[in-house]
Image (cartoon, grey):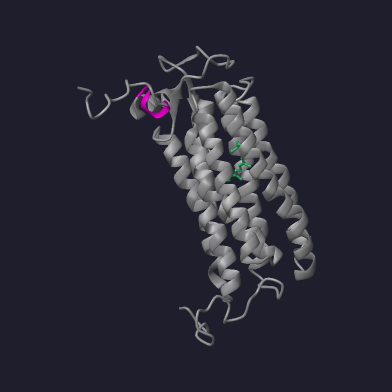
Amino acid sequence: MQPLIASAPAVGAHALQTGPTDAELFEYVFGGGNTLLALSFVVNIALAGLTILGIVYLGRSLTDPRSKTIATALLLISVVSISSYTGLTSGLTLSVIEMPAGHPAAGATTAGESGVLVMWGRYLTWTFSTPFILIALGLIAGSNWTKILTTCAFTIAMCVTGLAAALTTSSLVLRWWWFVLGSIFFLVIVYVILVDWTAEAERTGTSELFRTLKLLTVVGWFGYPILWMLGVEGIAILDVAITSWGYSILDIITKYIVTFLALFYIVDEPESITGGSDYGATIPGSGVSDD
Ligand code: RET
C-alpha cells in the first residue's frame, strides 16, 4: 500500500533550508574577513536610528493631523529600516544559496558551503518600507488614497517577486522571469509618480518639493534593479560587499535624505500640507485634538 504521507523532501531541497547556521553567517560577516560588508549593515542601523531621533525631535511641534500623518509615514520608513539591517547583521535574514545551472555563480562556495551569500532580508523588508515612502510622497503630492494604495500594492508585489527571484534555485530562466514581473510592477509605480503625482503636486502647491523628491526617488529606485542585475543574484559581476554597499547607499538617498527633505518642509506646516483638525476623523467635529 502507498503511504498516505509522502516522505519529507531531503534537507537542502529548499533555498532557506540549506547552508550555514545564523551563528556561522554572523561569524562569516563579522569575524574579520568581511569588514566592508559588515559596515554596510552597521552604518545603516546608525543612520536609521539617527533619522528616527531627528523625526521625533523635529516633529514634536506638529499640530495638524495631516502633517502628523506624513511625519508618521516618514518615521515608519526608518523603523522598518533599523529592523531590516538588524536582521541582516544577526545573520537571521542571510542565507547561502546554490545558484541554478548556467548561473555565473553556480558552483561558488561561501563560508565553507556551496552557494553564494544572498541578503534576502533586503527584499523582504522593502516590502514593508517602500509602501511608507509612497504614502509620504503621495500625500505630499496631494493624491487620493486609491492611487496611493495602488502604488503600495504594486511595490509589495515588486518586492515579493524580487525575493522570489533571489531565492529561486530550480531554474535560471525562472529567476529572470520573476525579475521581469517585478520590473513591470515597478513601471506602474514610476508612471504614477511621474504622471499623476507630478500633475497633482502642481495643483496642490507642493511641486517644488515634489520635483526634488521625485528625482531622488525615481533615479534612486532604478538603481535597485540595476544592482540586482549586476550583483551576485544576477550576472554576478559585482561581489556581495560591493552590491551590499550599493543598496546601502541607495537606501541612504531614497530613505534618509528623502525623509529629511520632506520633514524640513512639513515642520512649518504650510497650507499645501495641512488638512485641518477634522482630517482623518471618523466622526465630523471629533478631530479637534488627539492628545
Ligand atoms: C527588485 C527586483 C525585481 C525587479 C525590481 C526590483 C526593484 C526594487 C526596488 C527597490 C526599492 C527599495 C527601496 C527600499 C527602501 O527601503 C526587487 C530589485 C524592479 C525599486 C526604496
Q: Which residue is depicted at the point 59% across and 59% down?
A: 149
Quadrant in which residue 21 is drawn? top left
The residue under the point 59% across, 15% down is 104
Quadrant for residue 179, please give it. top right
- Most foreground residue, 39 or 169: 169
Q: Is residue 213 left or right of residue 101?
A: right
Tell me: residue 247, above or below residue 205: above
Where residue 263 appears, as percent x and y from the top left, is: 63, 61
* Left or right: where 244 falls relative to 21: right
User: Residue extending furthest bottom?
Assistant: 285
Total marks placed: 0
Is residue 282 visible in the rendered image? The answer is yes
Residue depicted at x 57% and y 23%: 232
Bounds of the magenta segment: 15-20
**Residue 116: image location, x then y, percent:** 49, 20
Q: Residue at x 53, y 14 (%)?
A: 101
Image position of 103 (left or right of 215):
left
Q: Residue furthest top?
A: 107
Q: Quadrant of ligand 1?
A: top right
Please, is residue 212 above or below residue 10 in the view?
below
In front here: 127 or 111?
Answer: 127
Is residue 217 in view from this perspective? no
Decide which of 225, 91 is in the foreground and name it. 225
Q: Does residue 43 belong to the magenta stretch?
A: no
Q: Which one is nearer the viewer's eye here, 44 or 74?
A: 74
Q: Position of residue 286 (x, y in %)?
A: 50, 85
Which residue ends up furthest to the front in the rendered image? 1
Q: Quadrant of the N terminus?
A: top left
Q: Position of residue 274 (x, y in %)?
A: 65, 74
